[in-house]
Amino acid sequence: MVSPAARNPGELTLNRLIKYTVETIRTRLDRLYLESIEALGNTAATNGRGHGDDVPALQDELESLYAEILPVAQMSVEEQFLGPALKSLSARNGKSLVRSAHAANYVSTKMNRASVAPT
């Protein structure tokens, strides 16, 4: 049995790129969240008052962003890489189709001439 990766290595590469993009964005969000929590803690220590409502608000914001990461990463990767690749293949296939049409037309013309020619 042939593995899915062996059948379509381009799709596997695209899926890996999407996965790594999602992981990178999540890591950046986590870092920004931790830096924000640290900054809130430093501000609270300096001002002498707490920021108890800010932390849950940051968590809610982060969770809403997490839900959007995968679809946005898919769209981004497809736009950056899949679209140009498909356009290139389409152009190549279009040229091949034109060549095939010319060849079929040539063969048809030669066959018509051969069938009309006296023997």
Image (cartoon, rainbow, N blue to C red):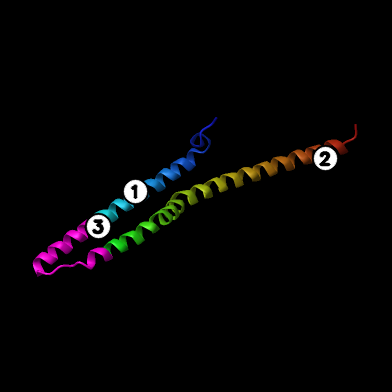
Q: Which quarter of the figure has residue 97?
A: top right
Instruction: Say what secondary structure mark 2 lies in.
Output: helix
Image coordinates of residue 30 in percent, x first then y, are 27, 54
Residue found at x 57% / y 48%: 90
Instruction: Say what secondary structure mark 1 lies in.
Output: helix
What separation in Å lies between label 2 and label 3 (alpha carbons)? Answer: 74 Å
**Front residue of this view, candidates 78 and 110:** 78
**Front residue of this view, candidates 117 and 99:** 99
Whichever of labels 3 and 1 marks the residue nearer the N terminus, that label is 1
Classify residue 66 as left or right of residue 46. Answer: right
Q: Quadrant of the N terminus?
A: top right
Q: Which quarter of the figure has residue 44?
A: bottom left
What separation in Å lies between label 2 and label 1 (alpha carbons)? Answer: 63 Å
Q: Nearer the viewer, mark 2 or mark 3?
A: 3
For disc 1, the marked residue is 23
Q: Magenta span has 86?
A: no
Image coordinates of residue 12 in percent, x first then y, are 46, 41
**Front residue of this view, candidates 5 and 47:** 47
Q: Are marks 3 and 1 in contact (CB under 8 Å)?
A: no
Q: Magenta span has 42?
A: yes
For disc 2, the marked residue is 112
Classify residue 40 as left or right of residue 19. Answer: left
Q: Quadrant of the C terminus?
A: top right
Q: How many marks?
A: 3
The part of the chain drawn in magenta is 32-57
Classify residue 53 as left or right of residue 113. Answer: left
Whichever of labels 2 and 3 marks the residue nearer the N terminus, that label is 3
Question: For residue 32, which numbered disc appears in the image?
Answer: 3
Q: Amino acid at mark 2?
A: Asn
Categorize mark 2 by other alpha carbons within 10 Å: few (<14), some (14-19), many (20+).
few
Q: Amino acid at mark 1?
A: Glu
